[in-house]
Image: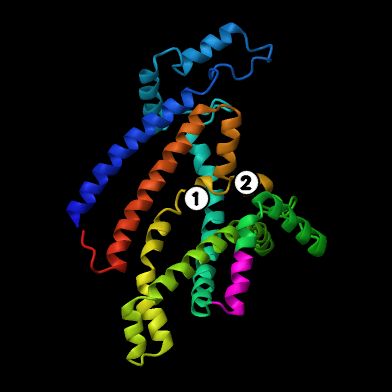
Amino acid sequence: MLAFIGRSAIQKIITLFFVSIISFLIVHLAPGEPSQIDPLNPKFTQEVLERFRKEFHLDKPLHIQYLYYYRDLLTGKSVSWKDNRPVLKKIYERFKNSLWLFILGTLITWTLSFPVGIHAAIRRGGLYDRSTTFLAYLLISIPGFFFAYMLIIFVVTHFHVPVIGMETFGISSTGWHWFMDRMWHLLLPSILGAAGGIAVLSRYVRNQMLEVESQDYVRTAKAKGLSPDKVHYKHALRNALLPFVTMFGLILPGLIGGSVIIESIFSWPGMGRMAYEAILARNYPVILAVNFISAILVLVGTFISDLLYMVVDPRIRL
């Protein structure tokens, strides 16, 4: 176990190092230069540009810039070019906002997907199966921004309540009313984010269950006279879980990139929206920091998947 953890940690550190190099090169290979942030601003003279380049080491070769940037990032000295605030502090503030969307959306997705997919597989070809299949493909086909606007129009028209932002303007920042207002503002974007996930994941669950149900050991369990619930949930479901262990480990990067559209539409100040704004503003320190954190989340997720494989399938040994 300890040998596996050590070997996996070394592999992931090496992978993270190469990811940081590639992402740094890709960002700096984009057309134009970072110093051309606002050439139309009359106060942005050539002297100011040169001072800007020198302050952020943009006058150095790329490999020197790489060393300076990640030194500043890891020591907490890296600052945003847009507002001169520490990058890690900005990310932490937005991370707290995105975390609630991520947790609630993930809980809704994984809580509903498995019952829907399992019952669709058990009732294959029936009305329930056809209805959930139609609804799943409908949710997959509808563009997220269109579905969001339709949902906003429906809620505002019928319930006459605000849905944009994290809280209603003018409400007190403490007390029960504030808590319920925050939960209401959190609910709608979370449902929107979970809708597509439920549609996709429930199809995976259904197909995997159908594949396992056709195996010989499941037919043998039925022939022994075991109850249908015991056959479906003890014998079939446990073996159908293996592919979802990988999917579960890879949901962590969704904390950053999976909510860009939702956060933009609902004016939710989260990490996805911050990354999008940083790309538009050519704010390289924020872009690289978000990309670096995304890579860490991916590697942590794969490590968790490796450990969960051992729990779900006793045949796997580390």
Magenta-drawn stretch contains 309:
no
Q: Is residue 101 above or below residue 275?
A: below
Mark 1 near mark 2, Cβ–Cβ under 8 Å?
no
Q: Residue at x 27, y 64 (%)?
A: 310
In this picture, which residue range is highlighted in magenta?
125-136
Residue drawn at x 19%, y 54% as measured from the top left:
2
Q: Which residue is mark 1?
A: 254
**In the rendered view of the protein, which quadrant contains the N terminus?**
bottom left
Q: Nearer the viewer, residue 56 or 277?
A: 277
Nearer to the camera, 234 or 311:
234
Q: Is residue 178 left or right of residue 3?
A: right
User: Is any atom of residue 75 visible in this view?
Assistant: no
Residue 140 place in picture, x, y as percent: 60, 57
> What is the CA distance from the residue labelled 1 to the residue labelled 2?
12 Å
Q: Amino acid at mark 2?
A: Ile
Residue underneath mark 2? 261
Q: Please tell me which of labels 1 and 2 falls first in the chain.
A: 1
Label ID, residue 121: none
Q: Residues within 10 Å of mark 2 (few under 14, many from 20)?
A: some
Classified by dominant secondary structure, the portion drawn in magenta counts as: helix
Q: Would residue 37 appear left or right of 12 to someone viewing this image? A: right
